[in-house]
């Protein structure tokens, strides 16, 4: 985890980055530190970076001397969809979270919105647009495009953690008995999870459900 850059005594919006690709944090830091001053806009300061959920927890822990005001986070970190948890960590620490990702499935936009994200941006956005979004969110606004808000409103809700575990078993070809044995639940409970997902997503088979989960990014595609 990188350390925060020196900051002056002037008030500044402190920006942290949570992404498992170091180049993203370096680019954001360079954009912040390369800005020219302007009285018409809030000053930004780089407040550190993290690559994992554990490092993000340390960055956002209560009592930190200079905690971030805004956190830019990817949805998908090396260990999974931990970026959604970062949104909640940021909110608990009194910070705003903006999702900055190339993982643009509509259901993930909905999940980020429901977790309390204040914005959703593509990693291909220009640095100036990203910093403008940071200022907007720090000032109490949001940074969702109209298309992202539509996606958040109408996209399917992602499965719960337990449902994802069931889906992983189904994708691997396991029976309900085998899945239940691994998860410590009954086969009847496994089937109940599957029936609820069938109804929720309008599918009629396990195969169709797994295809949908991969298409939406809930499960990673293999081979």
Image (cartoon, rainbow, N blue to C red):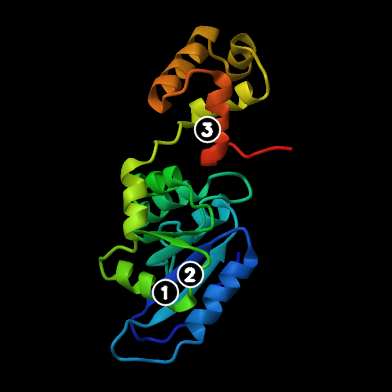
Residue 105, visible in the rendered structure: yes
Within-10-Å neighbours for mark 1: few <14, some 14–19, many 20+: few
Distance from the alpha carbon under mark 1 to that under mark 3? 32 Å
Query: Of the numbered discs in the image, which one, if any, rests on residue 125?
Result: 2
Residue 109 image position (x, y, % from top left): 41, 49
Residue position marked by numbered label 3 in the rendering: 212
Residue drawn at x 57%, y 15% is 184
Name the quarter where the N terminus is drawn: bottom right
Question: Which of the pair 45/209 is nearer the observer?
Answer: 209
Residue position marked by numbered label 1 in the rendering: 129
Residue 6, visible in the rendered structure: no
Residue 129 image position (x, y, % from top left): 42, 74
Disc 2 on helix, strand or loop? loop
Above/below status of 117 relative to 140: above
Residue drawn at x 37%, y 86% is 9
Residue drawn at x 57%, y 31% is 211
- First-in-chain label (3 vs 2): 2
């Amino acid at each position: 985890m990188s350390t925060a850059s020196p900051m002056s005594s002037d008030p500044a919006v402190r920006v942290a980055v949570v992404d498992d690709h170091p180049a993203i944090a370096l680019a954001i830091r360079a954009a912040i530190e390369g800005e020219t001053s302007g009285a018409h806009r809030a000053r930004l300061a780089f407040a550190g970076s993290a690559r994992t959920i554990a490092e993000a927890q340390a960055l956002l822990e209560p009592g930190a001397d200079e905690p971030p005001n805004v956190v830019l986070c990817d949805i998908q970190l090396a260990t999974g969809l931990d970026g959604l948890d970062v949104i909640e960590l940021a909110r608990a620490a009194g910070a705003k979270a903006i999702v900055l990702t190339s993982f643009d499935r509509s259901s993930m936009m909905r999940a980020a919105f429901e977790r309390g994200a204040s914005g959703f941006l593509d990693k291909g956005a220009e640095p100036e647009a990203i910093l403008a979004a940071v200022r907007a969110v720090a000032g109490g606004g949001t940074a969702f495009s109209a298309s992202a808000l539509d996606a958040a409103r109408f996209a399917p809700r992602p499965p719960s953690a337990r449902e994802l575990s069931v889906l992983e078993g189904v994708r691997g070809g396991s029976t309900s008995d085998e899945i239940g044995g691994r998860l410590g639940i009954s086969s009847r409970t496994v089937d109940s999870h599957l029936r609820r997902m069938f109804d929720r997503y309008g599918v009629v088979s396990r195969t169709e459900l797994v295809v949908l989960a991969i298409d939406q990014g809930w499960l990673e595609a293999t081979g």
